[in-house]
Amino acid sequence: MTGLSRRGDNVGLKHMRAANYLLAVITAVAAAALLSTTGQASTQRPSVELIRVPNSGIQPQIVERGGVVHLLYFTGDPAKGDLNYVMSRDYGKTFSTPIRVNNEPGTAMATGNIRGGQMAIGANGIVHVAWIGSAAALPRAASNSGPVLYARLNDARDRFEKSQHLNQASWGADGASIAADSQNDVFVFWHAQPPNGKDESNRRVWLAKSTDAGRSFAGEKVAFDEPTGVCVCCGSKAFVDVDDTVYLLFRAATEVVHRDMYLLSSVDRGQRFHGSDVAAWNIGACVMSSAALVHAGQDVLAGWESEKQVFFGKVDRRTHKVGSSNAAPGTGKNRKYPALAVNRYGETLFAWTDNMSWAKGGTVEWQLYDPTLQTQGISRQADGVPAWSLVAAFARPDGNFTVVF
């Protein structure tokens, strides 16, 4: 009986050890699953989904805020069309009924890719939009040039309020961009000639600021006094970070041929701006470039173009300058219009277009980066970016990405 008891004990011990091992495995798997949903680094590479702009629109602009994806896009005649706003609560599976932003039909334009509207989400979730008016936009600005226009979504969120004209003294405006902080400030930027300006070297970055969430604006002023000039048909990108620091990326035109990328920053709600040269480019032609600025946790990533290539880099929170830059891998025919998105794990999607030119569509390309900004896998591409358009991107709650084109 003693021998049988010992053998039974040994069998029971083996079963217990096996059960404990199985429990340990299950616990480890559960713990890993928990970590992957609580902001820790995921071991699975993100996926990238491609979707077209609703209603065959172009020039998508996206802001994701509090689980809502806000999307601005253009429809109609590229020379005199409309801006449309929609939102999605299921991360792009469905979108709301479009609301036209511009009060008067045909007063927005998309010709040249960078002249469409830009959008910001301000305090209390208010949607703000700025754009350059088409030839149909009245009244005209100085020298019979296009006005800089602004509109905000009303409190009922069912229509946009009447558009406001923001430029009076400056003329030949282009590259409108917009940002909003947590204190009801709204910043609308553009570049244009001063009253006696003659060429690109005379152009300046201008600013109109609202302190009442866009209900009214102070008069326009030159935002940056240094004589950098501005590339006449290039875009710009405004942004406000978690500390309410205001940024603007724009392309200079010093002595007409030095078309470096500049980053402006203001820590006093737009009273004074400091500038830093991000990337040099000497070329005696307008390059119709765009730029990107997005949050990466508490940091900011900046994206830009230079010499038919696209780059991005992290903005130093102390110096407000861009450190080392990352070029898109490989080479393309004419890489333009960068877009950035960062997911909950700190992984980055960098997207851009290739082989686009005046009135010609092209491809969308993208590359994934890990939290240390090292590439993840190879870059991908897909055809179908329409003429006059560009691309936008956002991260979904599961860590995957969506590119809209």
Image: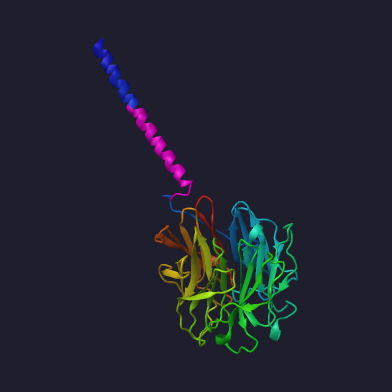
Q: Position of residue 62 (x, y in %)?
A: 59, 62
Please state which of residues 279 and 103 is positioned toward the viewer in this rendering. Answer: 279
Does 138 appear in magenta? no
Q: Position of residue 184 (x, y in %)?
A: 65, 63
Q: Quadrant of the N terminus?
A: top left
Please state which of residues 31 and 207 is positioned toward the viewer in this rendering. Answer: 207
Instruction: Give the left or right position of residue 224, taking residue 14 as reference.
Output: right
Please state which of residues 187 and 17 is positioned toward the viewer in this rendering. Answer: 187
- Location of residue 12 with respect to 348 vertically, above or below: above
Main secondary structure along the magenta-highlighted residues: helix
Does 27 appear in magenta? yes
> Which corner quadrant of the image does residue 21 belong to?
top left
Residue placed farthest to the top in the image?
1
| Colour mapping used in the image | rainbow
Which residue is located at x 49 percent, y 65 percent?
Answer: 301
Q: Determine if residue 106 is in view.
A: no
For the magenta stretch, what is the residue range?
17-41
Which residue is located at x 60 percent, y 65 percent?
Answer: 60
> Which corner quadrant of the image does residue 375 belong to?
bottom left
Residue placed farthest to the left in the image?
3
Q: Quadrant of the C terminus?
A: bottom right
Q: Determine if residue 343 is in view.
A: yes
